[in-house]
Amino acid sequence: MERAGEVSAAAGNGNGAVRRSPSTAPSARVSIWESVRACGIWGKEVDKAELRRQVVMPLHLRRAVAAAVAAKDEAAGVAAASAAKEGAGDGEKEEGPTVAPLVVFVNSRSGGRHGPELKVRLHELITEEQVFDLSVVKPSDFVHYGLSCLERLADQGDNCAKAAREKIRIVVAGGDGTVGWMLGCLSDLYKMKREPVPPTGIIPLGTGNDLARSFGWGGSFPFGWRSAVKRYLSKAATGPICRLDSWQTVIQMPEGEIKESPYSLKKVEPADRLEISQANGTELSEKASCYKGVFYNYLSIGMDAQVAYGFHHLRDEKPYLAQGPVANKLIYAGYSCTQGWFCTPCTASPQLRGLKNILRLYIKKVNCSEWEQVQMPSSVRSLVVLNLYNYGSGRHPWGDLKPEYLEKRGFVEAHSDDGLLEIFGLKEGWHASFVMAELIKAKHIAQAAAIKFEMRGGQWNRAYVQMDGEPWKQPLIQDQSTILEINKVPYHSLMINGEQ
């Protein structure tokens, strides 16, 4: 199979050229080294004054952005910029253009108790106006009002605002779900033709942190985090930019609704059906209930999603049990043992049988317009569609495949920007455990440019699905099909490579 597309060496935005996404297999194993390294003198390499010179915006711009976001009105930001300039004329020092202005978003609920402390530390390093708490400010507010304010000031002849808008970079302090939330909001800039789109760096505060691992930001919040924060910010300001494929999921249900749907999955309004149909070449029934969402790392169906669903509900009901990534992983591992993945044979209960009983898999290969059915192995109880190397806290289930095997199966080497998804299966819990320990490889099923799942309930009345770690119950109907279709979004997300 040929790769869907190659990176143009000249492609890029105001932040510089875009590079081929890094081979991420090694980065899955560096989180402990990164944590230890951050405890020592490495975190002290970055001079605070030099860092501020690189990333802190001029006074009038940072006040303008903060005011526009707070008021949800770009005019309020323009007024704040004028007031700051007048203050500079009365004796306050007004800085010049910034080399690489950073705006940081902190998920204060991630990272155990570190979120609020990290926010205070960021205030010390790069000013309060350039740090936003996601419990107060949504990324969409920044995109629609903060960046709009910079664009309006630039249109009025403010060269500093023009340079800041072209060079601005985003840092997300949170887990994979938080990063995906940010990327989804930034993608609106493509739709509104408001490029360039700022690239995104990561301070890993989540449990799995697979996006962070894949782009060289490490897999855990470091032990010596106070000094390491300067290093994160410096890398975000100077790191090269890589591309990341984004994948849209569209679900058509004959009837009913998805209860407790994650924020990444939204119901499709009637006015949007035509746009989705034209983009994907698929007809959406007027009577069907339709949902859409975007994922960047993986989508899975089956037992692993069921375990994730139970874990999330347990964490919500008893938040005192989940005080950080280590505690979360222990709870997750314990919960997986209670769901019958290890000890209950597939034939013991309709809800624990292989996915082949309810699911048909179709794929489109590169440059092909026809769907091709792929036979599902009867032993598979969890099906994973993977965009990145890393899955399940830095594991590499697809494996580093030899050229001979790739050629035999018609596969190509996987990259996060190649326009292809890898599909693999996990059997019972013991098989999954050996795969996650990287003692064996997962069950390779296919590599595809588009995917369609046709699910029909039979004796099942639901399936469990998750996108980038956000699980939900998918209702099924006995004699009618629920269709889940995955297609590539026509534009790339931009990531900052933290491996320097």
Image (spheres, helix red, strand yellow):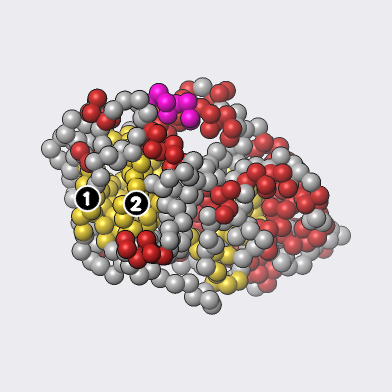
Query: Which numbered dot is residue 375?
Result: 1
Is 383 a magenta residue? no
Whether residue 418 is visible to the viewer of this picture, yes or no, is: yes
Q: Is residue 238 above or below residue 43?
A: below
Q: Residue at 72% of width from left, 65% of height from top?
A: 98
Q: In which quarter of the image is residue 497?
A: bottom right
- Tell me the kind of residue under disc 2: His
Mark closer to the chain start, 2 or 1? 1
Given residues 27 and 59, the one toward you in this image is 27
10 Å neighbourhood of mark 2: few (<14), some, or many (≥20)?
Answer: some
Tag 2's secondary structure?
strand
Q: Residue at 48% of width from left, 23% of height from top?
A: 317
Query: Which numbered dot is residue 444?
Result: 2
User: What is the span of residues highlighted in magenta in the rendered image?
Assistant: 332-339
Q: Residue at 42% of width from left, 34% of height from top?
A: 308
Q: Can you give x and y, in whole percent of width and height, for residue 170 in the image?
A: 60, 56
Q: In which quarter of the image is residue 108?
A: top right
Is the C terminus in the top left, top right, bottom left or bottom right quadrant? bottom right
Question: Which residue reaches farthest bottom?
Answer: 10
Q: In this view, does 467 lie to the left or right of 40?
A: left
Distance CA(mark 2)–CA(mark 1): 12 Å
Query: Which numbered dot is residue 151?
Result: none
Q: Can you give x and y, in whole percent of width and height, for residue 278 in the image?
A: 26, 63
